[in-house]
Amino acid sequence: MGGSLIERLQALAGRELTAETWAQDAVNQPMIRHWAEAMGDRNPIHLDEDAARAAGRDGVVAPATMLQAWTMRGYAATVAGGPASPVAAELAALLEEGGLTSVVATDSELEFVRELRLGDRISVTETVESVSPEKRTALGTGHFVTTVKTYRDQDGEVVGTQRWRLLRFRPERPATPGTAAQPEPAAQPDPAAQPEPAEKPRPLRPRPATNRDNAFWFEACLEHRLLIQRCTACGTLRHPPGPCCGVCRSFDWDTVEASGRGEVYSFVVNHHPRVPAFDYPLVVAVVELAEGTRLIANLVDVEPDRIRIGMPVVLEWIDADPQLSLPAFRPAGTEKN
């Protein structure tokens, strides 16, 4: 097919990305109960038949925000994979052709047409709505790809829609400190050049989303300083950084430097999908600092089966590249590998 890359990408608008896919299970009370507990949703119309009828429903209804969850394939099906639709395969090939290898979700807009009741069986289809012109962002240059998922019940009636937007971008090469990041130079043919190495360079670690409220924190990380934001009005420590104190609502703040000591509050071991920028096994933990605040960071220099809740840890640093350093933690009393 002829045309520029953006023309070919935008030609996909209106085409079906995912054919009709049915939920594995009907809307049911056990899944609603698990969701409500995990989300802290105490609305009785999701769990109590009498309360739901008193509120004008015919019976228990599912939380609206569960809409997407009913049609999720689950871990086993995701790992097993399967042939992509022709449109999905074409979209992936075009993005690969343009070097748009990195992805970040930017937003999701949900519209709920009616509440789901016990016994409803939900299906979903997904179409490409639009591909934006090339955009230059703090993460890199790329395109916003917007798709629309349409959810229907067993009678074919629309119960909700979800507009899902991703930024597919080409990571910028890290700049030398004190200089601006430069775009990749255009390739020039050179008959005397050596063949390309078979192995591609390792992708950069994904860039954090920085803004005026958290930029100071990432800048301090480059200096290997772990800062905690402190309200100067009431002294409350808070993380992640934000503009306002959640206790006294003051906008005045300063920072204190963390001691680097803490303990594992919770953790997960990420197995799938494997992202080339990370090392595996990939342990992601919620660490409770000695100062009382918590943050999410990698655990390093420890086998996953040796991690325990409450395990003492100490600060370590991941220097991903000249423009990105992030805090990590290793078990207290161990030597750095």
Image (cartoon, grey):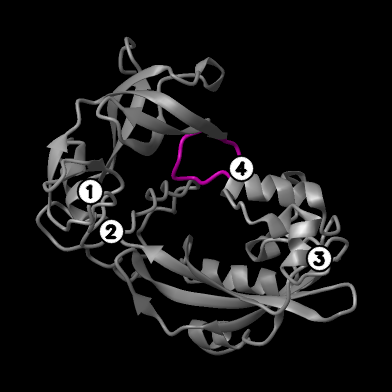
- CA–CA distance between discs 4 and 2? 26 Å
Magenta run includes residue 149:
no
- CA–CA distance between discs 4 and 1? 27 Å
* Mark 2 or mark 3: whose residue is earlier in sequence: 3
Three-letter amino acid code of the residue under disc 1: Phe
Residue corresponding to mark 4 = 272
- CA–CA distance between discs 1 and 3? 45 Å
Q: Residue 218 bears which disc, if any?
A: 1
Residue corresponding to mark 3 = 117
Region of the chain picked out in magenta, as a range: 270-280
Image coordinates of residue 206 in percent, x first then y, are 39, 52
Residue corresponding to mark 2 = 210
Three-letter amino acid code of the residue under disc 4: His
Q: Are marks 4 and 1 in contact (CB under 8 Å)?
A: no
Three-letter amino acid code of the residue under disc 3: Arg
Q: Is residue 41 above or below residue 260?
A: below
Quadrant in which residue 255 is drawn = top left
Front position among marks 2 and 3: 3
The answer to whether residue 309 is seen in the rendering is yes
Image quadrant for the N terminus? bottom right
Pick whichever, 71 or 88, lies toward us.
Answer: 71
Q: Residue at x 70, y 76 (%)?
A: 160
Magenta run includes residue 275:
yes
